[in-house]
Image (tube, rainbow, N blue to C red):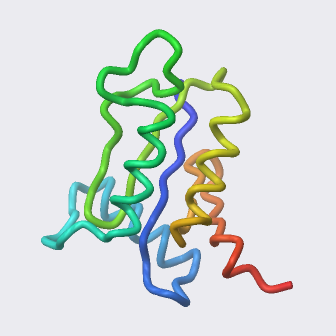
Amino acid sequence: MSFDLSVWALPNGATPAEVRAAVQRCRQGWHGERYPDPRVVAFYRAITAAYPDRPGGPDSPWEVTPLHAAGDHVEMNLFPTCEDQVLLDIERLAGEHDLMLFDAQDGSVYPPPARVSP
């Protein structure tokens, strides 16, 4: 069973409930008609430059390839045994690109570090 994370490009001020609602729409197959958010494009390019998803390769952290990318998010299904560095890179890149991080295992939503109040 994979370890699933996704990153979401929602407007500033988006709440965890809004991220979860977006996840549910995705799971129902509704993605809407929109151009890819530049933050999502930049994240996808950065994460796949470090960990290619086409093709996955023997050392790939991705259990499912290619990654699911839509206009407002990227879903990543990782092997549960992937290195911690992969998770750290996903978290770092999500923050660098101002994306919300959704953990499908428990429904947690993490805002980018820049959005976290001290």
Q: Is residue 28 left or right of residue 118?
A: left
In front of the other: 25 or 36: 36
Q: Is residue 80 left or right of residue 72?
A: right
Residue pushed farthest right? 118
- Residue 46 rendering spot, x and y as whole percentages: 46, 48
Which residue sits at x=54%, y=72%? 98
- Asked if 13 appears above or below 63 in the picture, the reply is below
In front of the other: 22 or 91: 91
- Residue 97 rendering spot, x and y as whole percentages: 51, 67
Tally of numbered tags = 0
Residue pushed farthest bottom? 13
- Asked if 33 appears above or below 50 in the picture, the reply is below
Which residue sits at x=63%, y=25%? 80
> Which quadrant is home to the C terminus?
bottom right
- Residue 31 rendering spot, x and y as whole percentages: 22, 64
Residue pushed farthest top? 58
- Residue 105 rendering spot, x and y as whole percentages: 61, 45
- Asked if 64 appears above or below 31 in the picture, the reply is above
Which residue sits at x=53%, y=25%? 61
